[in-house]
């Protein structure tokens, strides 16, 4: 149940950012849920491989290249999903940064809600 709630929160974040950023477009709410699922799968399967392959440049840039790795994951999701479009790598980088921030906020609200229930 916890996983489903997190995926729905991630889909909500994707929809909110598609409204905020002009270079990101999500056709339907169902597409947003699919984007959340695909991004989760890509982050688990593909991202570790990309991190290992780009480790030297990541070290040279003191970790800033990880922003580009995240943008590549977003662009890969764009290519895999019909109805989800991202215009360019810099839009994808901004989308990934804002998505991470928004997910952190939404997930912390979920944790705070659980704490108040237990008290």
Image (cartoon, rainbow, N blue to C red):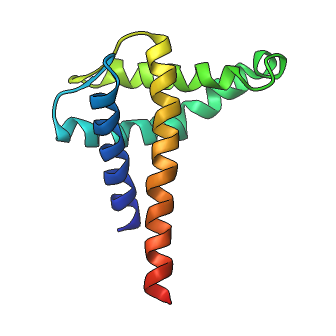
Above or below, 49 against 43 in this view is above
Above or below, 28 against 78 in this view is below
Task: State the residue in front, 81 or 66.
Answer: 66
Q: Quadrant of residue 1?
A: bottom left
Above or below, 65 against 10 in this view is above
Q: Can you give x and y, in whole percent of width and height, for residue 42 in the image?
A: 47, 34
Q: Can you give x and y, in whole percent of width and height, for residue 75 in the image?
A: 43, 19
Of all residues shown, which one is farthest toward the bottom?
A: 119
Q: Can you give x and y, in whole percent of width and height, for residue 25 in the image?
A: 26, 23
Q: Quadrant of residue 70?
A: top right
Of all residues shown, which one is farthest toward the top?
A: 88
Q: Residue at x 40, y 66 (%)?
A: 2
Horizontal side of 101 relative to 31 (left or right) equals right
Task: State the residue in front, 74 or 115.
Answer: 115
Q: Can you give x and y, in whole percent of width and height, for residue 93 in the image?
A: 52, 21
Horizontal side of 77 relative to 118 (left or right) equals left
Q: Residue at x 37, y 46 (%)?
A: 10
Q: Residue at x 51, y 79 (%)?
A: 115
Q: Residue at x 49, y 30 (%)?
A: 96
Above or below, 12 against 112 in this view is above
Image mark count: 0
Task: State the residue in front, 88 or 19.
Answer: 19
Of all residues shown, which one is farthest toward the front?
A: 20
């Amino acid at each position: 149940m916890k996983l489903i709630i997190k995926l729905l929160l991630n889909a909500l974040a994707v929809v909110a950012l598609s409204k905020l950023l002009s270079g990101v477009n999500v056709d339907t709410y169902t597409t947003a849920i699919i984007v959340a699922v695909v991004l989760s799968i890509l982050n688990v399967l593909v991202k570790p491989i990309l991190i290992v392959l780009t480790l030297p440049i990541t070290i040279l840039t003191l970790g800033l290249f990880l922003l580009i790795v995240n943008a590549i994951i977003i662009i890969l999701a764009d290519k895999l999903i019909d109805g989800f479009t991202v215009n360019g790598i810099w839009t994808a980088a901004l989308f990934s940064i804002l998505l991470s921030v928004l997910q952190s906020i939404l997930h912390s609200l979920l944790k705070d809600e659980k704490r108040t229930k237990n008290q």
